[in-house]
Image (cartoon, rainbow, N blue to C red):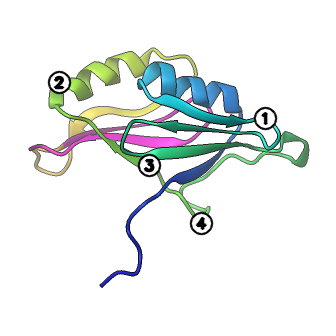
Amino acid sequence: MAETLGVNHLGLTVTELDQTTAFFVQALGWVETARDESYPRSTVTDGSLRLTLWQADRARGVVGFDRRTNIGLHHLALAVATSGDLDRIAAKLANWPGVIVEFMPEPVGSGPRRHMMFSEPGGIRLELIWPGA
């Protein structure tokens, strides 16, 4: 039996705290639940998952993430309720300032699951996935 109970929160370092916080709130409809300017950090949630977003120290030289060479987060996958929701959100994100779409919605394997990959304006690689059921 596992000694842990699941994810409490996920902490991500971002290049521009305000920009990434705004992306989650405005583009994905999340809620900002906390902010601490002394660190600085913010906390956002979709009601199921809580993210703590930490401002990178740009004075120390920021290095972008490379999923092929860096140890750590490859991407964060977020579920959506329907295939139609995936298409609707994808269309919105394709035109969102600073979003880089890796690929638009497509089947996972032989389906029926579908997903898309993109990076939010601060550089965090995200997947939206409809589980197909």
Mark 3 is on which residue type? Leu
Q: Determine the CA span between mark 2 and mark 3.
A: 21 Å
Q: Nearer the viewer, residue 45 or 90?
A: 45
How many numbered marks appear?
4
Residue density around tag 3, few if under 14, some if 14–19, many if 20 or more, within 10 Å: few
Residue density around tag 4, few if under 14, some if 14–19, many if 20 or more, within 10 Å: few
In which quarter of the view is residue 37 placed?
top right
Q: Which residues are magenta?
A: 114-133
Q: Which residue is depicted at the point 38% across and 16% down?
A: 92
Is residue 70 visible to us here? Answer: yes
Give the label, 4 or 2, closer to the camera. Answer: 2
Residue to which mark 4 is pinned:
71
Q: Which residue is depicted at the point 62% across and 36% down?
A: 34
Which numbered disc flags the more N-terminal residue, 4 or 1? 1
Which numbered disc flags the more N-terminal residue, 4 or 3? 4
Tag 4 and tag 2, C-beta contact below 8 Å? no
Give the label, 4 or 3, closer to the camera. Answer: 3
Tag 4 and tag 3, C-beta contact below 8 Å? no
Which numbered disc flags the more N-terminal residue, 4 or 2? 4
Which numbered disc flags the more N-terminal residue, 2 or 3? 3
Disc 3 on helix, strand or loop? strand
Residue 96 sits above or below residue 64 on the image:
above
Residue to which mark 2 is pinned:
84
